[in-house]
Amino acid sequence: MIVPPAYRPLQGFYTLFRKEWMRFWKVSIQTILAPVLTALLFLVVFAYSLRSRVEIFPGVDYAAFLVPGLAMMSVLQNAFANSSSSLMQSKMTGNIIFVLLPPLSHQEFFAAYLLAAVARGLVVGAGVFLATVWFVDLRFEQPLWAIAFAAASSGVLGVLGIIAGIYSDKVDELAAFQNFIILPLTFLSGVFYSIHSLPPFWQWLSHLNPIFYMVDGFRYGFFGASDVPPGVSLIVVCASFFALSFLTLWLLRSGYKLRH
Amino acid sequence: MVPAIEVEQVSKHYGGLRALDGVSLKIEAGEFFGLLGPNGAGKTTLINILAGLVVATGGVARVMGHDVVGEYRAARRALGVVPQELVFDPFFTVREALTFQSGYFGLRDNREWIDEVMRHLDLTGKADTNMRALSGGMKRRVLVAQALVHKPPVIVLDEPTAGVDVELRQALWKFVRQLNRDGHTIVLTTHYLEEAEALCSRIAMLKHGRVVALDTTQNLLSRHSGCYVELRLAPDRLPDSLAALVAQRREGGYRLALSDYIEIERVIAELRASGVAIQEMEVMSPDLEEVFVQIMSKH
C-alpha cells in the first residue's frame, strides 16, 4: 500500500514563488545590476543635457525630479520582464510542464508569478534609488504614497507580463510587447518631464496612459506635488490592476495557450 | 477497488483531426500496463488528458477515481508523468529541480525520499550539478525522478527509454519493476516492443485515436495464429510450390511464414518430394512486434 506524503495547502504557491525569486537572483547581473546601471546612465545624460530646458515643479532640481521617474521606470520594466520572460522561456523550452503537471490552482500560479514580478521590480527600484540618491538632493515627503505606487504599479506590469508571457510563443512576439507597448508608454509617461510642459493635446493624450499615473503618483511621494491628485492616480492604477488581474485569471482558468 | 485509470469515451478533436475518437479503457491498480501504437495514434494525447495538459473534447477520465477536470488536485497528486521530450530548467541544479517539484505537489521536508529516488537513479553524485551540464541520459533520469518525488500511486512513462543507453535502460526497468512490486501502477508507452512484451501484463494498442486491441500480453501473443520456420537446405533451393511462404531470404537459408503450425507437415512433404534435404530447422512463435504489425495492418 502506497502512503502518499502529507499535502500542505499553499506549499505549491510558495515553492513557485521561491523558484521565480531564485531564478532572477541567479542571473542578478542581468536582472538587477544591468537595469540599475542603465538608470544611472539615463541620470547622467538627461540631468546634464536637459536640466535648463525642462520645466518641472517649482523649487525642484531637475536631477532630483528625474530620480523617482527613473526608479519607477525600472520598477515597471523589470516587473514586466520578470513574469513575461520566465513564462515565455518556460513555454519555449517546454519546462512549463513542471508547473502544469502539479496540483497548482490557477490562482496560485497567478499569485506566484505576480509576487515574483513585484519583488524583482521593487528590488531593482531600490537599487536605482540607492545608486542615484548620492548625486541629488532628494526629499521623501510622503513615503507611504511612494511605497503604495511602487507596489501597485509593479503589480500592474507584473500582470501584464503574465499576459504577454502566456500569449507569446516566440521571442519576437514578446519583443513586440516590450518595444511597441511598454517602452513607448513608459517613455511618454512623464519619466523625463512634467506633462505641464507639453502642448494641450499631448497633455490630454498623456492622461490616457496609465503609466503616467504611476510615475506621477510615485513622484508625489517624494515631492508632495504632482500633476494629478495622488488619490485619483491610485484609483486609476488599482483599477488597471484589478481589470488586468481579472483578465489574466480568466485566461489561466481557461488554460489559454497553456493547456491545449 | 478503485481503478488506477478509467477512461470513458474520451475524444480530442483539433479542428477536423480526431486525435482521440471515443477511447475507453480501465487500468486496475497495481498493473504494469502498455500503451502501444504508431506515431500519431493518440498515446501522448491520452496521457496529456490524464495529466491535465490537454483538455478532452468529450468523455471522462479519472485517476484513482478522481475526475481529471473536476477533482484535478486529487487526480494530479495521484499521477506522476515522465514526459517524452527531454525538458529541463537550465537555471537550477538537480537537487533544486527535485525540491521544487516536490514543493509544487504540496510537500515540505521531503529530502529523505528525494535522496532515495536520486540513489536509485544513480543521481546522487550529480545532485549539485546544474541541469545544463548533464548528459542526455542523466537529464532523462532527472525527469524520472521528478515524476516520482510525490510518491504517486500511478506512474506514466511516455517513451522513457528513447535515446537512452543500455545501462540506464536496465537500471530504469529494475527501478520501475521495484515500484510496481511496491504497489505503484505503471503505464508505459514505448516503441521498443520487446520491452513492452517483457514488462507489461496487459496492453492496449491504439491507431488513429481508437483502441484496436486491449488484452493481456499473453492473450495478444496467442492471438497470432501463425509461426515462423527457419530452414537450411541442401541443396540451397526452395521448391516453387513453397515460394509464396518466404518471409525472408537469408544467407544459406529461408524464413517461411506459416499461417498455422499444421503447415509444417506440408513444408516437409514438399521438400522431400523435391529431393531437398533439411540441414537445420527452427520453429519460432511470433513476438509482440509481429502481433503488433498484424493488428495494425487489419485496422
Image: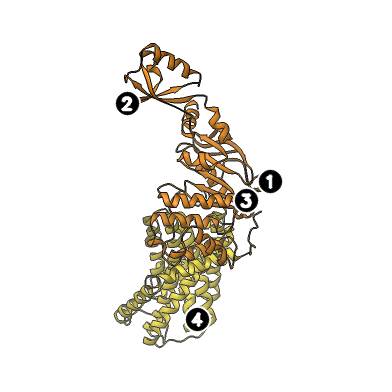
Chain colours: A yellow, B orange
Residue A88, how many percent across, how many down? Answer: 43, 58
Tell if the residue under mark 4 belongs to the same chain as the one under mark 1. no
| Visible residue check, residue B91 | yes
Q: Residues within 10 Å of mark 1 (few under 14, many from 20)?
A: few
Q: Amino acid at mark 2?
A: Gly
Q: CA distance from mark 2 to mark 3?
A: 50 Å
Q: CA distance from mark 4 to mark 2?
A: 93 Å
Q: Which residue is mark 4?
A: A221
Tell if the residue under mark 4 belongs to the same chain as the one under mark 2. no
Label tally: 4
Q: Is residue A203 above or below residue B220?
A: below
Q: Which residue is mark 2?
A: B252
Cβ–Cβ under 8 Å for marks 2 and 3 = no
Choose mark 3 or mark 1, whichever is in front: 3
Q: CA distance from mark 2 to mark 1?
A: 56 Å
Q: Amino acid at mark 4?
A: Gly
Most extreme residue toward the right is B1
Q: Secondary structure at mark 3?
A: loop
Q: Amino acid at mark 3?
A: Gly
| Visible residue check, residue A260 | no
